[in-house]
């Protein structure tokens, strides 16, 4: 279970590319950053294609494979304040703002909270989770 969650988070890793034209070298200088995920950046080649991982950023033919130490890494961070261990496995029910729906906030084994609402599905955070976090 924990394993599959980690996979999910790594899939969310994004490679951000910044570039500027270097007039002296007459070429574009690019810098790369990984946001999210838990695995530090690495590069990978499949056939003639080169990728920055995690995030599956495919380099153009003209792009040089960067040095690993030049790739900035901003890993996924779980909640700043550790949640109480005794709450692990609990499911909290939260009413929607209109009071017409009930959402389930799940405190899972990896120590993170997941909500059943649509907003959480898109943004991986929502006010129901905030509500639970503030009460724990
Ligand atoms: Zn929610």
Image (cartoon, rainbow, N blue to C red):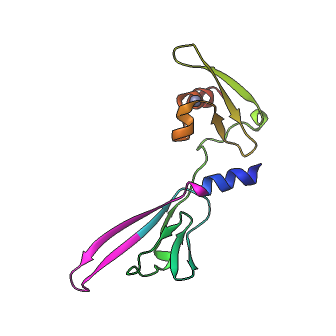
Q: Residue furthest top?
A: 99
Residue 53 pos. (x, y %): 55, 68
Q: Residue at x 75, y 50 (%)?
A: 2
Q: Height in image: 1 above or below 17?
A: above
Query: How far across and down, in percent of the image, does residue 90 sit?
Result: 76, 31
Q: Quadrant of ligand 1?
A: top right
Toward the front, the furthest residue is: 47
Image quarter where the C terminus lies is top right
Relative to 133, does residue 2 appear above or below in the rendering? Answer: below
Q: Image point 32% across, 70% down: which residue?
A: 19
**What residue lies at 35% left-to-right and 66% top-to-bottom?**
18
Q: Position of residue 130 (x, y in %)?
A: 56, 31
Nearest the viewer among 45 and 22 is: 45
Of residues 32 and 73, the one nearer the viewer is 32
Q: How many marks?
A: 0
Of all residues, the one furthest to the left in this rendering is 23
Q: Is residue 44 magenta?
A: no
Quadrant of the rendered image containing residue 92: top right
| In the displayed structure image, the side of residue 25 where residue 43 appears, left or right | right
Q: Nearer the viewer, residue 80 or 93?
A: 93
Relative to 16, say whether 83 is above or below.
Answer: above
**Residue at horizontal 36%, vertical 73%?**
30
Judge whether 1 appears above or below 68 on screen: above
Q: Is 30 inside the magenta-drawn segment?
A: yes
Left or right relative to 90: residue 35: left
Q: Which residues are magenta?
A: 11-31
Residue nearest the observer in this picture, 39 or 65: 65
Q: Main secondary structure of the magenta part?
A: strand
């Amino acid at each position: 279970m924990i394993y599959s969650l980690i996979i999910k988070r790594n899939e969310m890793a994004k490679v951000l590319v910044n570039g500027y034209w270097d007039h002296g070298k007459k070429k574009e200088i690019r810098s790369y950053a990984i946001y999210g995920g838990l695995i530090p950046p690495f590069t990978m080649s499949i056939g003639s294609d080169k990728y920055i991982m995690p995030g599956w950023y495919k380099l153009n033919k003209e792009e040089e494979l960067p040095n690993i130490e030049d790739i900035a890494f901003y890993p996924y961070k779980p909640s700043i304040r550790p949640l109480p261990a005794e709450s692990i496995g609990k499911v909290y029910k939260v009413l929607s703002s209109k009071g017409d729906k009930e959402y389930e906030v799940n405190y899972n084994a990896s120590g993170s909270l997941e909500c059943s609402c649509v907003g959480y599905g898109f943004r991986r955070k929502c006010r129901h989770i905030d509500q639970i976090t503030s009460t724990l």
